Amino acid sequence: MTKNGQIFKWICFGGIGVYLAHCVHIAADDKLRAPLWHYLGLGYTSSFGVILVLAIFGLITLAISHHIKKRKVTGLQPISGKYTISFIVSYIPYVLLLLYSLYCSKFGFTFFTTSYGWEGFYSAFIIMGFVFCVIPVLPFCIFWQILYIVKWVRSRKAKQEKHT
């Protein structure tokens, strides 16, 4: 790993540390009335949760880039079939969200009241989409898709330069 990679890694760990310190602060303000892991979720709903998510995405990016570089150095293709399969699989949450919303448009979506048709579709799509963003499924999928596309384009350009 390069020096910049090491610095980036420790910045990400620092972001996770800031998040954990914030959770401990919340627990101390509450006088530890609940187990400590309950406060980890409370910190996620604050702006410190954004720091945590960005730090985790940064570490994932660093790990994937490091793995791809290792594959490149050993002479293997930087992007293997497993990466392509995982790229395709990353669209499953979107498809499930769309199918669930279509189901709710026909059979109703209950959130305080039951709504059908376009309103049921829209309500299910917005609310379940928000749930998938709070539990970072959709952001992770978008992140993975962007990362894969960038790596694929770079790999393709490198192949074209190699052949010319």
Image (cartoon, helix red, strand yellow):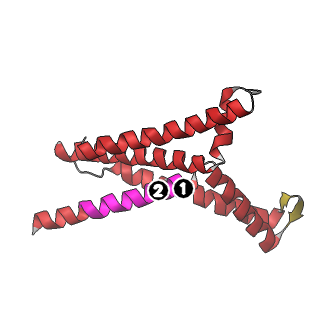
What is the quadrant of the N terminus in the image? top left
Q: Which mark is residue 139?
A: 1
Would you say 85 lies left or right of 122 here?
left
Report the magenta stretch's main SS: helix
Q: Is residue 51 above or below residue 151?
A: above
Residue placed at 77% from the left, 65% from the top? Answer: 123
Q: Residue 31 placed where, x, y %?
A: 74, 27
Cβ–Cβ below 8 Å for labels 1 and 2? yes
Would you say 56 lies left or right of 160 here?
right
Residue placed at 78% from the left, 62% from the top? Answer: 104
- Which region is colored magenta? 140-155
Would you say 139 lies left or right of 119 here?
left
User: In this rendering, does residue 88 appear at all?
Assistant: no
The amino acid at mark 2 is Phe
Residue placed at 71% from the left, 26% from the top? Answer: 35
Q: Residue 124 placed where, x, y %?
A: 75, 62
Name the residue furthest front. 29
Residue marked by disc 2: 143
Tell me how far mark 1 sits from mark 2, CA to CA.
6 Å
Q: Secondary structure at mark 2?
A: helix
Q: Secondary structure at mark 1?
A: helix
Question: Quick one: label 2, few (<14), some, or many (20+) residues within 10 Å?
Answer: some
Would you say 12 lies left or right of 23 here?
left
Q: Is residue 132 above or below residue 106?
A: above
Residue placed at 36% from the left, 41% from the top? Answer: 9
The amino acid at mark 1 is Pro
User: In this rendering, does residue 92 appear at all?
Assistant: yes
